[in-house]
Image (cartoon, rainbow, N blue to C red):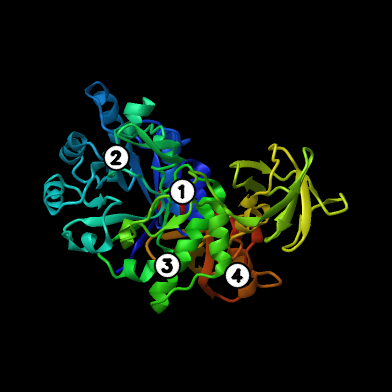
């Protein structure tokens, strides 16, 4: 059974990166009614553009409308649903039961996914949602794989396999509203679980202040086999507020693992790839309740930890000396673990104080003391310019097409297909050759000029009568016309 790789996008740049790096589907939020109000999110015009871009590459687009809706907002939200229906997005992700019922009754052909905010974990909920016309449920992150497989297969199951975890039951947290004045169920979580707390027992303080409610990052990349052999339909990655580099890497990372398993029923993750993953974002990793791990908390820090870069050997008010356990490049981000302060390495110096661009594992270097460090400390690398450059040069997704050209002394007929759509263009652009006739190689060269398009020519047939001449500009024109037609057909 094919498994869907579902990637988050908080803006248009991230969406295009997710699509080009191998997502099967992308989920986004609009400016209203999404559970990530602090992401950049999408205007209505951008949602139309996003749908066209996704569909061009054969990728599905899901839009979150997954906050609880107030009665005073009903006219606005129903107008928004009508817009999404007319835009032809592939599904809406909804948590409000009243809104789900309205969508099913008003737009029975619109695909509905129940958001994780709806707190779905019971078989009886599946029965209820099925009556409401739901196709898929995004299950609670508190469920184990075994518990998920015990739920009915009457609806598709979507499950988070990577990213941030919530310390509370999915969709049930009221702590943000009570302590932070903003509700996560309304899309504006105050992240109060990422704050320092003191434990008290009957009014008596117990231990130091720690991040007692801060969870690690879910990472199930080592369990692709188990996930594939489960009843899960869609593998979902969390992170609509993550960087473009993170989106590109995590998409390629899981795309590779999924493809490996589909082709060979096994996967492998190199230590180098794991190091890149940690460098991009981690709060410490856990396999989560999904794989029955109980230790999902990181009491020491709520921040991205990167990888261990080395150690501070001494410092002055002006400079910090570091013994490197990993390579370091000018422009990398670092953090000093013990004081939880970070900086960008704008200037990097060797032991003699000379400015350098990069240093290798085992070297001793100096950086400017921009954080007031006055002690020995562990140094973490939290971003890498080298890795960012590597990710920017990842090969991008292309679409295979086939062409058939039938050419006589009058007409040129070009058929272009992607296996689903077929575009046929016929033009009276040929004439009998007075001197040199066209060769198939001449025509192929022009038909294969696709570098500025998302397509590549997988197969071509050219049926050419003798003694034909065609101006090169005319061949280019008929190719462009056919490619434009195919592009528009795919975008619908």
In the displayed structure, does residue 428 sit left or right of residue 235? right
In the displayed structure, does residue 115 sit left or right of residue 269? left
Write down the residue under mark 2. 85
Question: Which quadrant holds residue 204?
Answer: top left
Write down the residue under mark 1. 53
Find the distance from the CA under tag 4 to the CA under tag 1: 28 Å
Whether residues under marks 4 and 3 lie with C-beta atoms below 8 angstroms apart, the answer is no
Find the distance from the CA under tag 4 to the CA under tag 2: 42 Å
Q: Earlier in the sequence, mark 4 or mark 2?
A: 2
Q: Find residue 444 and name its label.
A: 4
Q: Nearer the viewer, mark 2 or mark 3?
A: 3
Write down the residue under mark 3. 222
Q: Is residue 116 visible?
A: yes
Q: In front: 98, or 210? A: 210
Q: Residue at x 77, y 60 (%)?
A: 363
Q: In front: 323, or 408? A: 323
Q: In front: 205, or 209? A: 205
Q: Is residue 484 visible?
A: no
Find the distance from the CA under tag 2 to the CA under tag 1: 17 Å
In the displayed structure, does residue 67 sit left or right of residue 377? left
Q: Earlier in the sequence, mark 2 or mark 3?
A: 2
Q: Residue at x 79, y 53 (%)?
A: 357
């Amino acid at each position: 059974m094919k498994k869907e790789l579902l990637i988050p996008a908080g803006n248009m740049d991230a969406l295009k990166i997710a699509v080009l790096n191998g997502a099967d589907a992308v989920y986004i939020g609009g400016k209203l009614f999404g559970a990530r109000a602090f992401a950049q999110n999408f205007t209505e015009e951008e949602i139309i553009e996003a749908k066209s871009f996704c569909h061009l590459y054969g990728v599905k687009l899901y839009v979150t409308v997954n906050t609880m809706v107030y009665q005073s907002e009903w006219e606005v939200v129903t107008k928004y649903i009508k817009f999404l229906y007319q835009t032809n997005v592939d599904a809406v992700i909804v948590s409000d039961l009243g809104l789900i019922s309205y969508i099913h009754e008003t737009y029975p052909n619109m695909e509905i996914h129940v958001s994780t905010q709806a707190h779905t974990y019971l078989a009886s909920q599946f029965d209820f949602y099925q009556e409401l016309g739901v196709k898929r449920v995004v299950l609670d992150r508190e469920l184990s794989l075994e518990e998920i497989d015990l739920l009915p297969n009457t609806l598709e199951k979507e499950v988070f396999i990577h990213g941030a975890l919530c310390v509370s039951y999915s969709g049930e947290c009221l702590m943000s509203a009570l302590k932070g004045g903003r509700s996560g169920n309304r899309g504006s979580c105050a992240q109060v679980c990422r704050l320092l707390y003191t434990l008290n027992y009957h009014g008596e303080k117990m231990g130091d202040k720690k991040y007692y409610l801060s969870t690690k990052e879910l990472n199930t990349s080592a369990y692709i086999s188990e996930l594939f052999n489960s009843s899960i339909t869609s593998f979902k990655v969390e992170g609509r507020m993550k960087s473009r580099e993170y989106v590109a890497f995590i998409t390629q990372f899981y795309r590779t693992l999924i493809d490996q398993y589909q082709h060979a029923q096994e996967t492998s993750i190199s230590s180098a790839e794991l190091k890149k993953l940690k460098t991009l974002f981690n709060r410490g990793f856990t396999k989560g309740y999904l794989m029955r791990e109980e230790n999902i908390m990181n009491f020491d820090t709520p921040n991205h930890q990167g990888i261990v870069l080395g150690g501070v050997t001494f410092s002055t008010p002006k400079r910090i000396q570091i013994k490197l356990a990993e390579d370091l490049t000018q422009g990398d981000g670092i953090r000093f673990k013990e004081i939880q302060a970070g900086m960008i390495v704008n200037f990097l110096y060797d032991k003699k104080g000379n400015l350098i661009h990069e240093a290798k594992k085992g070297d001793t270097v100096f950086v400017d003391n921009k954080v007031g460090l006055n002690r020995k400390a562990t140094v973490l690398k939290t971003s890498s310019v080298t890795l960012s450059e590597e990710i920017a040069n990842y090969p991008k997704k292309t679409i295979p097409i086939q062409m058939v050209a039938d050419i006589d002394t009058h007409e040129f007929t070009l058929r272009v297909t992607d296996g689903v759509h077929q575009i046929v263009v016929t033009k009276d652009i040929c004439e009998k050759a007075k001197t040199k006739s066209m060769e198939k190689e001449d025509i192929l060269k022009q038909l294969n000029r696709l570098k500025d398009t998302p397509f590549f020519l997988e197969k071509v047939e050219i049926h050419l009568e003798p003694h034909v001449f065609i101006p090169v500009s005319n061949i280019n024109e008929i190719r462009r016309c056919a490619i434009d037609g195919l592009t528009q057909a795919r975008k619908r």
